[in-house]
Image: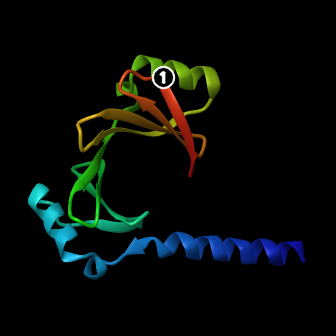
Amino acid sequence: MKRLIFILALMVSVSLVKAQEVSDKKVPSVIRLAFQQKYPNVKSVKWEKEKGNYEAGFKDGKINNSVLINAAGDIIETEVGIPAGELPADAKAYIMKNYPHKNIKEAAKITDARNNVSYEAEVDGRDLIFDDKGKFLKEVRD
């Protein structure tokens, strides 16, 4: 019985995650146009809906990028993948102290519409968010 409940819970959670993905055709034209104006050479985009906004995920060479665009077509934030070594020193120290023997799976530099910079590090299934100097701000579970 426990196994059946686990399988059903897993199926429901997978379907909820899938529900966030959006086909290119279902992305409003104002949002697609805003993205195309900013990134005219990007051909392959994976769209997701996130709290009423649309996130475009794409690669620039081998670097993972994403752009969050609101319903009006304004870019809210950009996220650019970086090597873990490029995280601020205080962020790396925080991770070493609080997650010993854990690896940084991915790291990114996030820039919002006002040019405020923050950093994200994925460690042990969590997204750790730091300010521009590397001060820990919050943890988000994946």
Give the percent coordinates (x, y) of residue 116: 29, 34
Residue 50 vs 132, above or below: the answer is: below
Give the quadrant of residue 28: bottom left
- The number of discs equals 1
Give the percent coordinates (x, y) of residue 13: 63, 70
Is the residue marked by circle 1 packed among few (<14), some (14-19), or many (20+) residues within 10 Å? some
Residue visible at 50% across and 31% down?
Answer: 137
Give the quadrant of residue 133: top left
Give the percent coordinates (x, y) of residue 47: 33, 68
Q: Which residue position is annotated with label 1? A: 92
Q: Secondary structure at mark 1?
A: helix
Q: How is the image coloured?
A: rainbow
Quarter of the image with the N terminus is bottom right
* Farthest residue, direction front: 72
Residue visible at 40% across and 28% down?
Answer: 131
Left or right: 89, with 67 as reference point: right
Residue 91 vs 9, above or below: the answer is: above
Left or right: 136, with 80 as reference point: right
Residue visible at 28% across and 51% down?
Answer: 76
Would residue 40 be visible to someone looking at this image?
Answer: no
Of 52 and 68, nearer the camera is: 52
Residue 89 vs 52, above or below: the answer is: above
Left or right: 41, with 95 as reference point: left
Would residue 55 be visible to someone looking at this image?
Answer: yes
* Farthest residue, direction right: 1
Residue 96 vs 83, above or below: the answer is: above
Residue visible at 13% across and 57% down?
Answer: 39
The residue under label 1 is which amino acid type? Lys
